[in-house]
Image (cartoon, grey):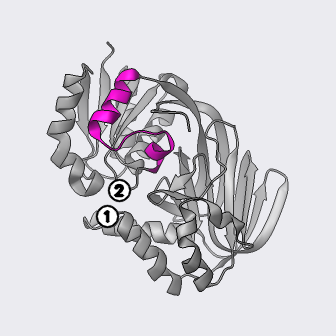
Amino acid sequence: MEEWLVIANPNAGRRKAEKDWKQISSLLIKYDIPFKSVFTEHRDHAVKLARKYIEAGFKKIIVVGGDGTFNETVNGVFGQQRFPPEEITLGMIPVGTGNDWARMFHIPFQYKGAIKIIRNEQTYLQDVGKVNYFNSDHPVVRYFVNMTGMGYDAMVAQKTNKQKEKGKGGPFSYMLNIFTSLFSFKNVRYEITIDDQRIRGDVFSMNVGICKYNGGGMMQLPFADPADGLLDVTVINKVGRFTIIRNVRNLYDGSFVKIPQVKTYQGRTVTVESVRKMYLEADGESLGHSPFRFEVIPRSLKVIIGGLP
């Protein structure tokens, strides 16, 4: 059996990955999965590790971590030059705080179940998103496999990520930040172009993505199909604070899209321009600022799944 590269993030799940590594590695051995393990040491280290070991010949990778570690690994897959990205197989053992990509593909949060799925190696070719943005006014490119957020979503993600760095972040923190950030956020005047359709307004929050969930199970893109060759877009226009508070529970089943201020779209390319800087998160990772250009790369990543989305 071909050897797997295991990229593990010791900090994932408030250092749960580090505490449980012995259990995880023992289960990999028990289920006859040969592997070489490497550990991330800082932000974006998984990008470099994935690129380095793929170029050394590895074509099968298991990520032990959360959505952010998975995102970094995918960026390593698309940053290497040796193999076409669709020839690399990615599996995941979820140890993060949100695990939204794993939720989409029915991957258990229990280690034994996730490792059995990797052993079965049922694969699926999913779409990948690509976003061009700016970081301190320098152009940057990032790939994503789940979802990006702008406006209020990005502010909440940034606060939660800062708490994670101090070992305090998690789904509860994310929910708490949704409420506490309401009093400081200001809507942003925007112009969005989705293929040939142009939209203007004052945006409260916006998501562009491939899959349905973010924020630990919130269904921000309820109509997303990860292999339809399209980006899904949800725009929440200027909305009152009490409307938001009343409808937070509706984020979990996607029914919030029935609110008049919420609009959903689909397209192959999306551009976003704003009067003042709008910030971005991708797969939970806080990145840079507008203007943005999104595009989809259809069925370009081979992933191991527990069931069809």
Q: Is residue 153 left or right of residue 29?
A: right
Magenta stretch prevailing secondary structure: helix
Q: Residue at x 63, y 53 (%)?
A: 222
Q: SS at mark 1?
A: helix
Residue 97 has which mark? 2
Kind of residue at disc 1: Lys
Q: Position of residue 189 (x, y in %)?
A: 71, 76
Residue at position x 29%, y 54% from top?
13
- How many numbered circles are shown? 2
Q: Residues within 10 Å of mark 1 (few under 14, many from 20)?
A: some
Circle 2 SS class:
loop
Q: Amino acid at mark 2?
A: Thr
The residue positioned 36% from the left and 70% from the top of the image is: 173
Q: Which residue is mark 1?
A: 164
Q: Quadrant of the C terminus?
A: top right
Q: Which residues are magenta?
A: 100-120
- Is there CB contact under 8 Å for labels 1 and 2? yes
Residue 30 counted in the magenta span: no
Marks 1 and 2, how far apart at CA = 9 Å
